[in-house]
Amino acid sequence: MAVLKAFSGMILGKDAADIDRLWQDMFYQISYAPWGGAETRMLSAINIAQWDILGKASGMPVYKLLGGKAQQKLQVYNTMNGWPINGMREHDAPEKLTEFLLSRGIKGIKIYPYDRGPVNAAARHGGTFISTSELKQSLDPIQRIRKTAGDEIDIFLDLSSKWNLTCSVMIAHSLEPYD
């Protein structure tokens, strides 16, 4: 509620079509806050609402206001951020989850093998150490997804920028067989 109150003073009574100016003002006010916090989400929500208002007022779809259609199609991927999809999590049932996504035409999955699920090595060691056992356990969902779908699905990994150079190199080498 405090974030909403802080932003309302910056936007109430202002022209919603002044998208860039308001974004700059709001961004400047939250530049002290960590990225990804409530302030950033609120800034994003307000910005999206402004574009929606401008689109409705002009009778144009937002993509045209942003410069027009750049592509005919966009590839969709699914992000597994610890939330279940159809009752499945990437660490518990990667095979079923992969088949479920492919059956819906989703040909990409982003997972967090090092900082979600049973291993959670990034949080446990602060990104400064990963044991051989943790490294192998973290590869399990990747192996199972690849075995289930082969090259039919792209696997994206979010490492959350938590690893030091030594661990990053170890992780990268362990991933080489999985393309």
Image (cartoon, grey):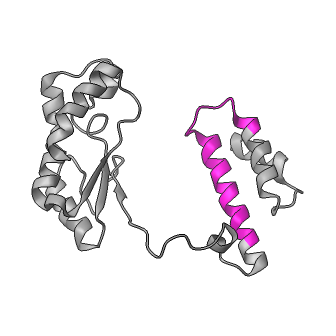
Quadrant in which the N terminus is drawn = top right
Residue 63: image location, x then y, percent: 62, 71
- In reply to whether residue 46 is colored magenta, the answer given is yes
Label tally: 0
Answer above or below: position of 73 versus 155: below
Q: Is residue 134 left or right of residue 158?
A: left
Front-lying residue, 41 or 147: 147
Residue depicted at 28% across the width and 23% down the height: 167
State the image coordinates of residue 120 (x, y, percent, origin top left): 27, 31
Is 26 left, or right, of 91 in this rendering? Answer: right
Viewer-proximal residue among 160 and 94: 160
Report whether residue 101 is seen: yes
Point out the residue furthest to the left here: 147
Is residue 31 inside the magenta stretch? yes
**Spot occupied by residue 148 in the image (x, y as percentages of width and height):** 11, 59
Residue 119 in view, yes or no: no
Q: Which residues are magenta?
A: 28-54
Q: Residue furthest right?
A: 13
User: In the rendered image of this protein, does residue 55 appear above or below residue 9?
Assistant: below
The quadrant in which residue 5 appears is: top right
Query: Residue 159, percent across and down?
Result: 35, 36
Q: Nearer the viewer, residue 9 or 28?
A: 28
Most frequent secondary structure within the magenta stretch:
helix
Identify whether 56 is placed above or below 43: below
Would residue 74 appear left or right of 141 to someone viewing this image? right
| Residue at image coords 60%, 47% | 41
